[in-house]
Image (cartoon, grey):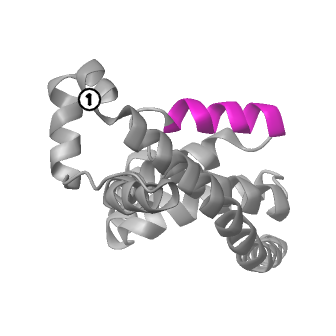
Amino acid sequence: MVQRTDCVELYNSKKEGFFRRRIARPILDLLRQGVTPEKMALSLALGVAIGVFPALGTTTALCALVAFVWRLNLPAIQIVNYFVYPVQIALLIPFFRAGEILFGAPHLPLSAPQVVAMVRASVWGSIRFLWTTTWHAMVAWCLAAPLFVALAYVILVPILRRATRQAAKAKATD
């Protein structure tokens, strides 16, 4: 009987979409374990914001540090961090351009695939070459991230409160 239940669960999980299976369900499970909607919303908002930080290879450590210092939910912040990796790559060039505008720096003709290839070829060489551009991009990120976190937090708190109430009602009816 246990084998059949596992098979049914596996079959049902295949029917769910990627977002629900990999993002929504783990977040709801964490809410059911007692994480407050406010802490979860802050974890998610910061996970996205830090996940798009324009310095490749730093976001996992930054998310872990922020979760530790602010006592946020580490699994939630890291799930979101990993999920937004493609967004981080897509936003590299816009952050580079914003940094160029902020500092009046000369335009560096690069594309996101070129930056990724450069990092893969030589991490230290790309750090040396892109140091000033990356530093400018990080300043641009520092200006945009707090606004994003505030907006995302305000949007997520009511959604997560409602999800918590619905989960509690579902548990009560079982």
Q: Which residue is mark 1?
A: 126
Depth check: 101 or 61 in front? 101
Q: Residue at x 28, y 56 (%)?
A: 107
Q: Quadrant of residue 64?
A: top right
Q: Which residues are magenta?
A: 59-70
The answer to whether residue 119 is left or right of residue 86 is left
Q: Is residue 94 magenta?
A: no
Q: Give the amino acid type for the residue marked by disc 1 in the picture.
A: Ser
Q: Residue at x 41, y 37 (%)?
A: 132
Residue 100 sits above or below residue 120 on the image? below
Residue 155 against residue 78 in the figure, above or below: below
Q: Position of residue 149 (x, y in %)?
A: 69, 63
Residue 158 left/right relative to 124:
right
Q: Quick one: label 1, few (<14), some, or many (20+) residues within 10 Å?
A: some
Overall secondary structure of the magenta section: helix
Residue 80: x and y, percent?
Answer: 53, 53
Closer to the camera in the image, 5 or 69 = 69
Q: Quadrant of the C terminus?
A: bottom right
> In terms of depth relative to the viewer, which is nearer, 144 or 148?
144
Q: Is residue 44 visible?
A: no
- Horizontal side, residue 107 vs residue 171: left or right: left
Can residue 31 be seen? yes
- Residue 36: x %, y % from top left: 85, 58
Q: Quadrant of residue 129?
A: top left
